[in-house]
Amino acid sequence: MPIARANGVELGYDEYGTGEPIVMVTGTGAPGRMWRTHQVPALTAAGHRVITLDNRGIPPSDPCPEGFTLDDMAADIAGLIEYLDAGPCRVVGYSLGAIAVQELLLARPGLVRQAVLMATSGRSDTLTAAMTAADRDLGDSGGTLPPRYAAYVQALQNLSPHTLNDEERLRDWLAVFELSAADPSSARGLLGLQLIPDRRHAYRRISRPCLVIGFQDDLVVRPHLSREVARSIPGSVYAEIPGCGHYGYLEKPGAVNSAIIDFFTT
């Protein structure tokens, strides 16, 4: 994997395809390879050069044990774009990654041509605060959940009832979750970054075209939070994908990919 030296840290990234660049930013604890199964093939087939980023705190990027901020994450995206001489480019962010992209749009708008913001929010609410506190407590405790239990919890949190009720698909998801169960302390630096003050007023200053995508059955970032972001960004477009939860880009990749590609061709 290539490494970029940007914003004072080393950042892992990958590139696929040729054409106009798209930088893709994942959420809490997720490596850039999460985009490889569905989004990278669709976007490269549509004629794009796709650049996936491993956020700081996610190997092989620097762990930054001293801690970091959302502004640091936005600066990392900017630094990678400049390192690759890819700007102004299109940027896709998911969950925490989308919040970081929103800060990039405010701090360095000249680096962005268009942005897609998936499962995003512009403020913290009570449930977000409770989930974050629980995740922090688990990570700080030094304990780990048994893989089968962790897989069951991950399924309930992130999948839609449509998937949970499909026994064959659910068995496949549970197997993947069990095999890929992460140490909760490994993403400690990222936990809490989504606990943001109300930024909706600031988002009125975003000047680049944005598509905001919500997932109908998302229990982690409920879609009304994403709709709030869309209402705050002048001229933005909102799309809600039915039949999927927080992992909507994996549960309903065809619908998500079509929405992204259609937006980027306008």
Image: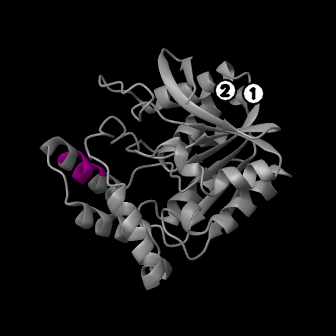
Q: Residue at x 49, y 68 (%)?
A: 245
x, y percentage for residue 197?
42, 42
Q: Please name the predominant secondary structure of the magenta segment in the image.
A: helix
Of callouts 1 and 2, the N-terminal one: 2
Using the rendered image of the protein, determine whether residue 11 is visible from the camera's viewpoint. yes
Q: Residue at x 74, y 27 (%)?
A: 86
Relative placement, left or right, of 126 versus 85 is: left
Question: Up-down: is 202 above or below 213?
Answer: above
Q: CA distance from mark 1 to mark 2?
A: 6 Å
Magenta stretch: give its range: 132-137
Residue beneath disc 2? 81
Residue beneath disc 1? 87
x, y percentage for residue 254?
68, 67
Question: Up-down: is 230 above or below 200?
Answer: below
Q: Secondary structure at mark 1?
A: loop
x, y percentage for residue 64?
36, 24
